[in-house]
Amino acid sequence: MHSFSPVIETLISELMKLPTIGRKSAERLAFHLLKSNPKQAEALAKAILDVKHRIIFCSQCFNATETDPCAICANPERDHTVICVVEDPLNVLAIEKAGIYNGLYHVLQGRLSPLRGVTPEDLRIKELIARLSGAQIKEVIIATNPDLDGDTTALYLSKVLKPLSVTISRIGLGIPMGGSLEYVDEGTLKKALEGRKQL
Amino acid sequence: MGIVKTEAIILDSAEYSETSKLVRVFSPARGKLSVLAKGARRKGSRVGAGLEPFTHVNLTLYLKEAADLGTLKECEVIESFAYLREDLIKLALASLYIEAIRITLAPGARNYSLFKLTLAYLHALRKCRDSTGMTVHFLLKLLKDLGFQPALKGCVRCGATERIRYFHLRRGGVVCAACAGETAELVALNPGEYRVLKKSVETPVKSVVRIRLSRKQSKALLELLIRMLEYHLETRLRSVRFLDQMMLEIP
């Protein structure tokens, strides 16, 4: 059976370690890199190394950053009395893009998952509690995803944060913009009705 | 095979590519099936909510002959068991039960009785006060369905019915004090726990929910059943880690 040179095989097997990349996709990417300008490949290799060498996690909020504390935690213009709890740094990016929130963040670095055996010890929950105990935080907004693991994380957080004297809220859940009522399941409808607003 | 309609319980759900989900489902007529739900992660998807673990659904799939991977066409929620999202202990216990099914169920292995049992468990868990005891009863029924029903009539070594003190994991039954010996495969069983275990095994599903267990008995028997499951399945159940921590933290 014909196989590629060991150098190409190594690249393919490394690419296959990335999420959602199978053998075929890895082969396509490897041959794209092989055909591309050497500078493009060097820039990609440098970018990967830079991420690994220069990016750290903020010691306060655990967001990905080049400086510690991160730009958000160090910004005096932001509201330091509100913390928005999210699952990963991509969620921070999504909220920041919307430009509607001016408080701080806390990145859990994952979410609880009973079926995958992810427990509170695997997340940055202890650090969140420590942060709330020693600062002037008045409100915690839980912004975990509205799925089983996200709901589990939110429920657990609400239980462990309750004894602390902070307001705990969760972002609104319900029918998405552009959605259609007739296709909404009972769980979503229940959340939408519970979270209704007076006009 | 083409278009197939089947009732199912969602066992597990994982992200697949930027917009899709890959779910494993328990179909009474087709056993464990993998289903690719294209576009399920898109904003406003009509099927996303139905693909959450534990959900009882009606699925319309495109399935090829002899394949165990289908493509989802439609998903209608029958029951979402949303109460599990409001009780961490019940969620952890249901996760244990569902994980055991996910590991043991074979693709293509039809099993109507296990499907019915699983739905009965998820409904019974909703209203019960002793969720650990309820899980013990249903795990015993699950073990029976899987062919691992514990032998409880008498000591599996000498047949004695008196002084039953241990459960032997490898032999899958109880042993008396005289036959116990020294082995890591023994789990201590007091007379009260033995009595409840026997009664639960002998009682049909409909009535088993009425058998009351003390808190101590529920905990001890659940531990025993987890050890039994892990011993026979030759794997550590991932949900046990979460369950242990919730049991410790939530009184």
Image (cartoon, coloured by chain):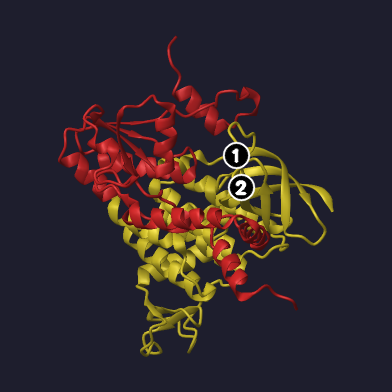
Asked if A145 appears above or below A31 in the picture, the reply is above
Report the residue at 26% width, 28% height from top: A78
Q: Position of residue B77 (x, y in %)?
A: 63, 38
- Asked if residue B118 lies left or right of residue A148, the reply is right
User: Counting other residues with Cα less than 10 Å from the Cα at mark 1, is it few (<14), some (14-19), or many (20 or more)?
Assistant: many
Please, what secondary structure does the residue beneath circle 1 have? helix
Q: Residues within 10 Å of mark 2 (few under 14, many from 20)?
A: many
Rendering quarter of residue A168: top left
Disc assigned to residue B21: 2
- Residue B213's x, y, as percent? 39, 58
- Total marks in image: 2
Q: Are marks 2 and 1 on the same chain?
A: yes
Rendered shade, chain A: red
Q: Amino acid at mark 1?
A: Gly
Q: Chain of mark 1?
A: B
| Pointer 1 residue | B48
Query: Residue lying farthest left?
Result: A134
Circle 2 or circle 1, nearest the eye: 2
Q: Residue at x 67, y 50 (%)?
A: B36
Q: Decide: marks 2, 1 in contact (CB < 8 A)? A: yes
Q: Earlier in the sequence, mark 2 or mark 1?
A: 2
Chain letter for the yellow part:
B
Find residue B102 and report its horizontal and vertical position in percent: 58, 60
Q: CA distance from mark 2 to mark 1?
A: 8 Å
Q: Give, as a three-letter code, the residue at label 2.
A: Lys
| Tag 2 secondary structure | strand
Outermost residue toward the right in this view? B1
Q: Quadrant of residue B26?
A: bottom right
